[in-house]
Image (cartoon, grey):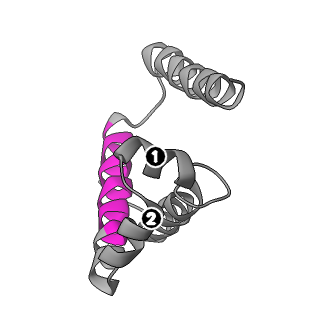
Amino acid sequence: MRVNLLAVLVSGVAIFVLGGLWYSPLLFAKRWVALLGKSEEELKSAGATPLMYLTVFVCGLLTAFGLAVIINHFGHLTPLMIDSGYNLVSFVLAGIILAAWR
């Protein structure tokens, strides 16, 4: 079983970039901070270290690698995988629409 490591790397970078955007002021930063019961000043004073960013990136790589192993394990598509893929994508799409349209 061969895993495309370049695809894993690109996926890991995409996960990292998505996280940066997700928790930015462009999307959910203010709401996330409010739900934590903290102020922006409190979070800024805690400070983000390079080790924290590295940890998040490595976790993204591990997630992508794990998914690549699972995808490679199944090989060819089956009707169950096509149906499950449809359900996954439909739930993600509905979640995006419902979260954004409140």
14 or 32: nearer the eye? 32
Q: What residue lies at 35% left-to-right and 77% top-to-bottom?
A: 45
Residue located beneath label 1 in the image: 34
Magenta stretch holds residue 64: yes
> Left or right of 89: which side holds 34?
left
The x, y position of residue 67, in whole percent, is 36, 47
Residue type for callout 2: Gly
63 or 48: nearer the eye? 48
Of the 4 image quadrants, the one containing the C terminus is top right
Q: Nearer the viewer, mark 1 or mark 2?
A: 1
Magenta stretch holds residue 21: no
Above or below for 17 versus 86: below
Residue located beneath label 2 in the image: 12
Around disc 2, counting alpha carbons within 10 Å, would you say few (fewer than 14), some (14 to 19), or many (20 or more)? many
Considering the numbered disc 1 on the image, is that residue within a helix, a strand or a loop?
helix
The x, y position of residue 99, in whole percent, is 61, 28
Q: What residue lies at 59% left-to-right and 60% top-to-bottom?
A: 21
The x, y position of residue 60, in whole percent, is 37, 61
Above or below for 78 versus 65: above
88 or 80: nearer the eye? 88
Q: Which mark is residue 97?
A: none
What stretch of residues is rendered in magenta?
Answer: 56-73
